[in-house]
Amino acid sequence: MYLYLVGLLLLYYVYRWFRELPRVPDKGNKYVYITGCDSGFGNLLARHLDSKGFRVIASCFSEKGEEDLRKSCSPNLTTTHLDVRSQDIVAKVAAMIKDKVGERGLWAVVNNAGVSLPAGLCDWLTIDDYKSLLDVNLNGVIAVTLSVLPLIKKARGRVVNVASVFGRISVTGGPYTISKYGVEAFNDSLRVNMAPFGVKVLCIEPGFFKTNMTDSAILSKNVMYLWEKMPQEVRDDYGTEYLEKLLAVLTEKIEKISDGDLMKVVGCMEHALSAVRPRHRYSPGWDAKLFWLPLSYMPTCVSDYIMNSQAIPIAKK
């Protein structure tokens, strides 16, 4: 019986592998608009797609990000400044893309731009902390997508949204997981809405990877900033020992569990853009596949127990 099930599972994966092999033709005439190309996944994807022959429009927040990409990529790659929080800048970039792609339309947009800070427990933050992050991670994704959606419909192209495995389960407080849950919801509704137009909407849900978002020094600095500005009453609730242990976790554990192979994510992004039959969802990283996603399917009482059993004890109970 077990061998029968294993055989069926093996056949399924072989079938899926063959089914996902075919790639779209004419990459040299397909424009891909990527946000957040200063560093990390977006930067690596821009370089990778440029080497594969796609016509890449790489948007960066900084001039240095644009300059570095221009130096390392072919003349076919176009860079532009983008702040996803600004409606005027988003519209200006969309107009530039419309002029560039012409009647063929835009093959794809990759909504990669995002931030992870401020990050902390819910009662460590203010509503302004939530708004500032949601403006980038959620509202920015929606704004960029809507700005070029008519061009994507014209090309019967693709929308690739970079969410997170923490858009499937919330293991910490703060706005980051909220923003990723929102991206998941926007992705699902857009996928259904765009299906009649032949537009494919795909979602990338990475686990922990070594980027600026998991840099222990940056995360520790953020924690200290929030600790210093929160009311004394809240600090008393948690205690200084809590702070010390939290900083130790950030320093000793986060980077250790973060995967350094960013191509696992970029490979999923490329497949979403170039495969004739892409997957609806990609979950790069063994932690995502073997721990976080299974945890998200467990009953709430079970997942809460597992997370609370690893929680740092507070001073006031």
Image: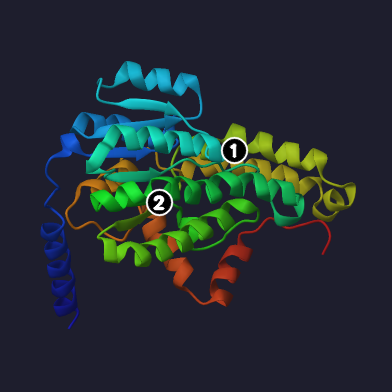
Query: Quadrant of the rendered structure where residue 223 is?
Result: top right
Q: Amino acid at mark 2?
A: Asn
For mark 1, give the secondary structure: helix
Q: Which secondary structure, mark 2?
A: strand
Residue depicted at x 32% and y 46%: 151
Amino acid at pointer 1: Thr
Q: Residue 91, percent across and down?
A: 48, 39
**Residue position for label 1:** 251
Could you say which is closer to the camera, residue 113 or residue 267? 113
Given the current orientation, which residue lies at the most extreme right position? 233
Residue located 89% across and 52% down the image: 233
Quarter of the image for the C terminus: give it.
bottom right
Rendering coords of residue 271 (x, y %): 24, 48
Residue 264: image quadrant is top left
Vertical side of 172 occupied by 219: above or below: above
Circle 2 residues within 10 Å: few <14, some 14–19, many ≥20: many
Ranked by sequence position, the earlier of labels 2 and 1 is: 2
Image side of residue 150 versus residue 274, left or right: right
- Please tell me in which quadrant of the rendered image residue 228 appears: top right
Q: Residue at x 48, y 20 (%)?
A: 63
Q: Is residue 9 above or below residue 20?
A: below
- Badge number at residue 161: 2
Residue 150 visible: yes
Which quadrant would the N terminus be assigned to in this image?
bottom left
Numbered mark located on residue 129 in the image: none
